[in-house]
Amino acid sequence: MTEVLVVAGPAAAGEYVADILARAIQTDPETVLGLATGSTPLPIYAALAERVRTEGIDVSSVSGFALDEYVGIDPAHEQSYHHVIDAEVTQTLGLNPERVHVPSGNPDTLESAGAAYEEAIRAAGGVGWQILGIGANGHIGFNEPGSPIDSLTRQVPLTEQTRQDNARFFDSIDDVPRHAITQGVGTILRAGHLFLLAFGEHKADAVARAINGPVSPEIPASAIQQHPNVTVLLDAAAASGLDAAEYTVVTGTPAGV
Ligand code: GLP
């Protein structure tokens, strides 16, 4: 079932998801988190870090698997997802770096990197809770339009729109890599529970098509309709392409649920 919630904004969405994840970790110290990059999930990591600190939650056995990485980027580059995940998640939450995985964008090992990543996820027992943003063109991870619903971790070309959307993180558009390695849509669908977050008017069309459009590789996020446990968290602007009857307005966190 896809539950669609409209919250006050990014901070409220972060609190909402962090609340659920904090309780999941307290129940199962070996919780496996599916980690997304981009600006959207940052409030989750900040809110969860706050809970870890104030409630003294033991995260030493928690694992994390990032969705994707640019191909050919130095892992030490500020915009590599290795760096971003380390700074925003591993350090912020105090996770064991050995338990936090990011697909390798090393061009020399790309052929085997996808299968190796799938195997690492499997060996960890699968992702329990997957955090997702959405691209303006409906991509999840770096699964651009045309990505098969059953795709697994692999190298993909980035569209011009995605390169332009992400150019703000680089000195110039020419510095934005042209390829990425990403968990497939099929990989993402194997997670136990999906959280898809989107904020702002520029995501409204992609959100509406993901929730109401036909399930199609043209809108990779539409695959969430095939997953039994999905929570979509939106602000009012990102929900503006939906009918009010399709969502629930939430003012608090799910404490006690
Ligand atoms: C990148 C990431 C996606 C992310 C998207 C949206 O393309 N690969 O996982 O969902 O950006 O980014 P933002 O959350 O900054 O809008």
Image (cartoon, grey):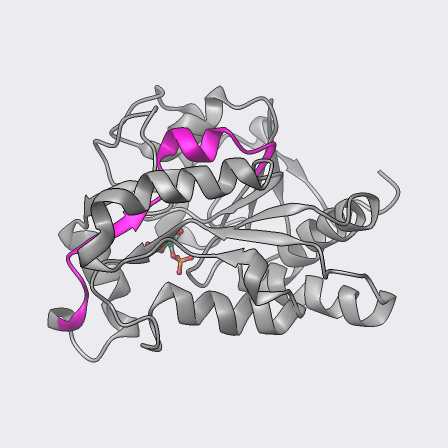
- Relative image position of residue 215 (x, y in whole percent): 36, 21
Judge whether residue 138 can be spotted in this image: no
Quadrant for residue 99, please give it: bottom right
Q: Residue at x 54, y 48 (%)?
A: 236
- Relative image position of residue 145 (x, y in whole percent): 23, 36
- Relative image position of residue 12 (x, y in whole percent): 67, 57
Residue 54 as seen in the image, left or right of residue 43: right
Q: Where does the magenta region start and end?
A: 175-194
In the orientation shown, which residue stands out farthest toward the bottom?
171
Q: Residue at x 25, y 32 (%)?
A: 147
Task: Please state, as top left, top right, bottom left or bottom right, where the N terminus lies in the image.
Answer: top right
- Between 241 and 14, which is closer to the camera in this rendering? 14
Quadrant for residue 212, please give it: top left
Residue 103 as seen in the image, left or right of residue 256: left
Task: Please state, as top left, top right, bottom left or bottom right, where the C terminus lies in the image.
Answer: top right
- Between 158 and 257, which is closer to the camera in this rendering? 158
Q: Is residue 196 above or below residue 4?
A: below
Q: Residue at x 50, y 29 (%)?
A: 190
